[in-house]
Structures are given as structure tokens and as C-alpha cells.
Amino acid sequence: ASGPRSTVGGGQDNTASGCWSTVGGGDTNTASGSNSTVGGGYRNKASGSYSTVSGGYTNTASGSYSTVSGGKVNTASGDCSTVSGGEGNTASGYYSTVAGGGRNTASGYYSTISGGYGNTASGYYSTVSGGGYGNNASGDRSTVAGGTGNTASSYYSTVSGGKVNTASCSYST
């Protein structure tokens, strides 16, 4: 613990270098952001101010007020972003969320992905809600409810499911 008022509770090779930062335990974890926390696990990093990694393996919370709850190789880089778990997920948009699954990316501001694999929510307030595979909600306020290879690419567009469907006009379904 090298940061002012920082704490390392246990484990091995852990570093708490940010002011008021904490590493609870585990192995090779780093809390370098001001008021950041790593609860445990292996090779986790909380570098954003007020960021948290609860545990897991090689997770990173680099946005201010960002959180990774667990899983493996997840990144919460947007300010106020969250990745709850899974593997290889990224929440890079401001207030974005990935609840789980694998290789999902929520890059739009306030975007959400609930699960599945290889889904992208890149529009502002966009959502991929039912999981599935390879879905893309790229329009602002667009939604893909599930399925495979679906795209909602325009403002308020929606695809409710199925395979390789596209909603490309504003307000289209």
C-alpha cells in the first residue's frame, strides 16, 4: 500500500497506490485510482477514480465510477459503466452496461446488453436485450430483442428477434 490512506488486506503481490484505494486480497491486483477498490481475484485493475473490481480474472475498471463485478477479461472503461460478469465484455460508453455473456460491447452512451455473444450496442440509449449472437443496435434509442445477426440501425428502430433481420429506417420494426 503506497498511496496515502490506502490499504492492502492480504493476498500476494497486490498494490494499492491510489489515494484512499483498497485491495482486499487475491494475487497481483492493483487499485491505482483515487478511492478505487479491488476485492480479490487475480490480475484485476481498478484505475479509474472511485472504480471497483469485485473479483475474477484480469478485469479492468478504468472509467471513473466504473464497476466490474467478476468474470474474466472484462473492461468497464466508460465513466459510470458496468460489466456484471461473463468473458471479454466491454462497457466503454458513458453509463453503459453489459450484464454478462461473451465478447459483447456497449459503446453508446447509456447503452445496454443483457447477455449473449458478440453483440454490440453502439447507439445512444441502444439495447440488445435478449442476448443471442452477433446482434447490433447501432441507431440511437434502437433495440434488438434477441436472435442472430440482427441489426437496428436507425433512430428508434426495433428488431424483436429472428435471424439476419434489419430495421434501417427511423421508428421501423
Image (cartoon, grey):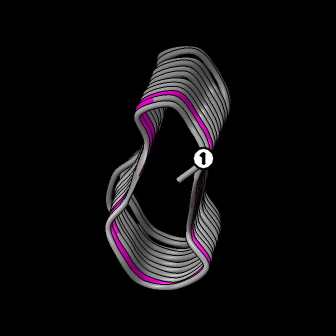
Graded by Cα atoms within 10 Å as few (under 14), some (14 to 19) or many (20 or more), the crowding at tag 1 reads some
Residue 69, located in which quarter of the rendered image?
Answer: bottom left
Q: In screen coordinates, is 80 left or right of 154?
A: left
Residue 161 or 56: which is nearer the viewer?
Answer: 56
Pinpoint residue 113: horizontal percent, then vertical percent: 43, 51
Residue 26 or 58: which is nearer the viewer?
Answer: 26
Residue 29, located in which quarter of the rendered image?
Answer: bottom right
Would you say residue 134 is visible in this rendering? yes
Residue 24's place in the image compared with 61, above or below, is below
- Residue range in magenta is 20-39
Instruction: Specify whether residue 34 is painted magenta.
Output: yes
Pinpoint residue 14: horizontal percent, then vertical percent: 56, 71
- Residue at 51 percent of width and 29 percent of height: 19
- Residue at 60 percent of width and 47 percent of height: 2
Quadrant of the rendering where the C terminus is positioned = top left
Q: Amino acid at mark 1?
A: Ser
| Residue marked by disc 1 | 2
Residue 166's place in the image compared with 14, above or below, is above
The kind of secondary structure the magenta stretch mainly shows is loop
Pinpoint residue 169: horizontal percent, then vertical percent: 64, 21
Instruction: Specify whether residue 24 is painted magenta.
Output: yes
- Residue at 39 percent of width and 66 percent of height: 115
Q: In screen coordinates, is 86 left or right of 74?
A: left
